[in-house]
Image: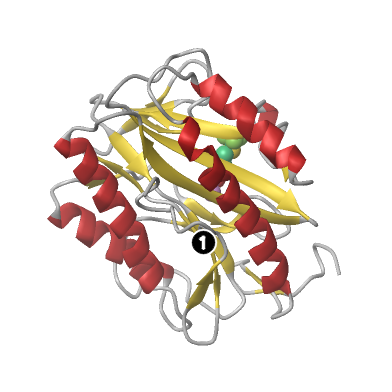
Amino acid sequence: MDEPTRGRLTKDGIRIYETADFAGMHKAGEMAARILDDVAPMVRPGVTTAEIDAEITRMVHAAGATSATIGYKGYQHASCISVNHVVCHGIPGPKLLKDGDILNIDVTVIVDGWYGDTSRMYGAGKLSRKAERLVQVTHDALMKGIEAVRPGNTFGDIGHAIQSYVEAERMSVVRDFCGHGLGRVFHAPPNVLHYGRPGTGPVLEEGMFFTIEPMVNLGRPETKVLADDWTAVTRDKSLSAQFEHSVGVTADGCEIFTLSPAGRFYPTSA
Ligand code: MF3
Ligand code: CO
Ligand code: CO
């Protein structure tokens, strides 16, 4: 069955997929995660983000997959690469990575019509202690959000788990970008907020597929989009980090579709 008839929609317009659909999401998610594993050795001072993106493009095609981002709303690359104070949607380009840079690489592939969307943080050379801490807190915030995914909980419970942890670490959660439903489409309801109050928002049901992708800043949460209409940066120029998994709600929790086959989601190179 194809969209829009596959599964059913909740009253909030969130699609409920079938048990058999998890297999397609696992295949797509694993492919995206494997690409993020395989690109890790390239991330070092002196390489450009365009060179990293070119390798990702090659890997997507070598795997027999399709890039979901090339041609998406005019975007022309197989990855977003967001360095230091770039929050998300960084465009790969000729800028050289330098010692101490932190960067998020975000890849979305389409395999047999299913979307796999994941991102993680990398470091070039030796990182400062505050950069290391930001990356660790952002990873742990994502995992706390994932721990809140089970039928009967709400999307507000996910946001609250993330926000309360991040703010206790004296960092801030970006409000201007959110996670999203996905499946046979890239971006679908609901908006998955990374902040919120317990018990608010739509109730989670078995068969929902969505991303959780918190962006965390060392300084204030405000962002702005540069003149290229894509690159989002922190207004106060503070460092920003992000991790993203695609998940599916099961009877008693969730499955993560984008687990790293090499066990290198975080830390990224170990
Ligand atoms: N992968 C991003 C997300 O997590 C979306 C990137 S859209 C692009 O939703 F066009 F900027 F690539
Ligand atoms: Co996403
Ligand atoms: Co993404």
In percent of width and height, residue 119 lies at 48, 46
In the rendered structure, the answer to whether residue 114 lies left or right of residue 263 reads: right
Q: Residue furthest top?
A: 94
Q: Which residue lies furthest to the right in this view?
A: 1
Q: Crowdedness of circle 1 by 10 Å Cα count: few (<14), some, many (20+)?
A: many
What is the three-letter code of the residue carrying label 1? Leu
In percent of width and height, residue 56 lies at 62, 34
- Name which residue lies at 50% across and 23% down: 49
In percent of width and height, residue 245 lies at 49, 57
In percent of width and height, residue 252 lies at 48, 86
Residue 221 visible in the current orientation = yes
- Quadrant where the N terminus sits is bottom right
Instruction: Tell me which colouring the rendered structure shows.
Output: secondary structure
Q: Describe the element under mark 1 as helix, strand or loop.
A: loop
Residue 89 visible in the current orientation = no
Q: Is residue 183 above or below residue 175?
A: below
> 30 or 190: which is nearer to us?
30
The residue identified by callout 1 is: 259
Res 140 quadrant in image: bottom left
- Name which residue lies at 84% across and 64% down: 2
- Name which residue lies at 70% across and 54% down: 185
- Name which residue lies at 67% across and 47% down: 109
User: In the rendered picture of this protein, how many numbered marks are placed on residues?
Assistant: 1
> 250 or 191: which is nearer to us?
250
Q: Does the residue labelled 1 lie within 8 Å of ligand 3?
A: no
